[in-house]
Amino acid sequence: MKTLVIHPHDASTDFLSPIYTGLDDVTLVTDSWSHNQIKEAIQTHDQVIMMGHGSPNGLFAVGQFPTNNPFSSYVIGTSMVEALKQKDNSIFIWCNADQFINKHDLKGFYSGMFVSEVGEAFYCKVPSFTQEAVDESNDTFARQLGECLGATRAPEEIHAQIREQYGQLAEHNLIAEYNHKRLYVK
């Protein structure tokens, strides 16, 4: 299976790399590609995995990608929706990706608000958080999702496995508990 991974280069999301490092036949896009190149790559790959920081409007480019619109800060936004609608097994991991997926009726495995930094835990009012709890949540989620992708690419199976495995951490890690409640499949 040809997999396109869009993971804008940003040290604060490096913890996500175990999601794709063990996969075969991966095209990794971290910077510099134009919107047209990305759209074409989406169309020619079997699965698209998109991750990093984002908002309800898409995946942030974090200054790593040229944009057609000088006012756009997204590498994955409305201009990619038609290409993404052709896929039913995409993976969207960024804060509030659920709102983007629901608004555009896209399919795959995705996250809602996902706490990956201490500041986000504070903002989301997660009680009794520590940097260690954030790191444990981040590292466990990325490792488990990477292992899961090595076994299956079906979004429903990914969702079920991650809910079970990551759910074990959520029993004693408040960051993981918060995130666990915001993992979806469509």
Image: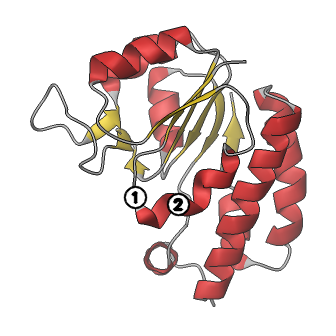
Q: Is residue 124 above or below residue 79?
A: below
Which numbered marker is on residue 14? 2
Identity of the amino acid at label 1? Answer: Asp
CA distance separating discs 2 and 1:
7 Å
Which numbered marker is on residue 75? none
- Residue that label 1 marks: 10
User: Viewer-proximal residue, 97 or 60?
Assistant: 60
Q: Is residue 140 above or below residue 9?
A: below
Identity of the amino acid at label 2? Answer: Asp
Give SS at disc 2.
Answer: helix
Judged from this view, the residue extending furthest toward the left is: 70
Marks 2 and 1 close (CB-CB < 8 Å) = yes
Image label count: 2
Quadrant, the C terminus: top right
Q: Is residue 130 above or below residue 27?
A: below
User: Horizontal placement of 153 versus 39: left or right?
Assistant: right
